[in-house]
Image (cartoon, helix red, strand yellow):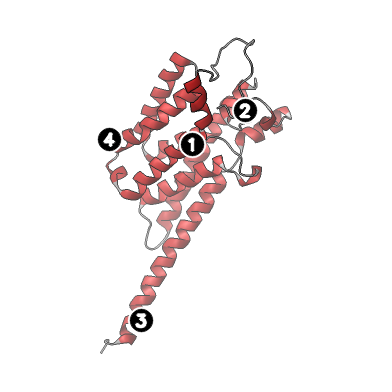
Amino acid sequence: MGTGPSAALPDKVVVMHVTSTVWLHSLAIVVAAYLLGSIPTGYLLMRIFRRQDIRTLGSGNIGATNVLRSGAKGLGAATFLLDVLKGMLAVWVGAKIGASGIPMIRPHDAMTLAALCAVLGHMFPIWLGLKGGKGVATAFGVFIMLVPYAALGSLVLFIVVFAISRIVSLASILGTIVFPLLAWVLAPWAHTYLPLVIICLICGLILVKHQQNILRLMAGTEYRFGSSKKNPPPPTGAA
């Protein structure tokens, strides 16, 4: 009794149910994290409080650096803070969704998947024709949730480099490059395949978004905060 093809059917049904549950919850993580990450905080703050489109100012970027450079220091700080918070919230929501399924998605798999989608949402927001920011503040938010000490290490490097060079893009690039190494050293779970790949992919995307900045750094023409007002404004695509 309980042998033959008919006995194997319940097992197949169980496997299919488990697989579909994991996929559905993964899809829910992707959608929720992307939508949270895609909230264009810099664009909204400038529209609400200054009646300006940040995309027409400075470099045209919607991130905190360009908002700050437009002269709206308070809004620039608020943009940075909100971009960090939306990244943190996306990872928290991803962890909750992953834990709600039966079986549960492994916590760090759910969190890193949410982290990637939140950064992608910021970089490619559906609300602005997929033209968003460079993802540094949002990535910092998701990294705080994933590996807080590694994120703080990258922040310290950012502060030191910026204090010396006054170049935001250089500080962002170096902080991004060092983060995967810090995560590897400080978080044993980051040695597993999926989280490690996603962390490296997020950092790679940020570097790709800074390709024009890298070229200007190599040419010695990148914008420095505090430079003379007689200098030409930063070219389109600056940080």
Q: Where 235 falls versus 206 (above or below)?
A: above
Could you tell me which residue is drawn at 56 percent across and 12 percent down?
226
Upstream in sequence: badge 1 or badge 2:
1
Of 2 and 201, nearer the camera is: 201
- Check the image and name the residue furthest to the front: 219
> Could you classify mark 4 by the number of other residues whose Cα lies within 10 Å: few (under 14), some (14-19), or many (20 or more)?
few
> Could you classify mark 2 by the number of other residues whose Cα lies within 10 Å: few (under 14), some (14-19), or many (20 or more)?
some
Instruction: List x then y, in percent, for residue 76.
Output: 59, 25
Upstream in sequence: badge 4 or badge 1:
4
Q: Nearer the viewer, mark 4 or mark 1?
A: 1
Tell me the number on the disc at residue 236.
Answer: 2
- Name the element at disc 4: helix
Q: Nearer the viewer, mark 3 or mark 2?
A: 2
Label 1 to label 2: alpha-carbon separation: 16 Å
Looking at numbered disc 4 in the image, what kind of residue is underneath it? Val
Residue holding disc 1? 208
Left/right placement of residue 105 relative to residue 83 reads left
Label 3 to label 1: alpha-carbon separation: 49 Å
- Name the element at disc 3: helix
Looking at numbered disc 2 in the image, what kind of residue is underneath it? Thr
Could you tell me which residue is drawn at 39 percent across and 28 percent down?
154
Residue holding disc 3? 9
Mark 3 and mark 1 in contact? Answer it, CB < 8 Å.
no
Mark 4 and mark 1 in contact? Answer it, CB < 8 Å.
no
Instruction: List x then y, in percent, for residue 91.
Output: 45, 45
Label 4 to label 3: alpha-carbon separation: 46 Å
Residue holding disc 4? 185
Left/right placement of residue 134 relative to residue 58 reads left
- Name the element at disc 2: loop
- Check the image and name the residue furthest to the bottom: 1
Label 4 to label 1: alpha-carbon separation: 24 Å
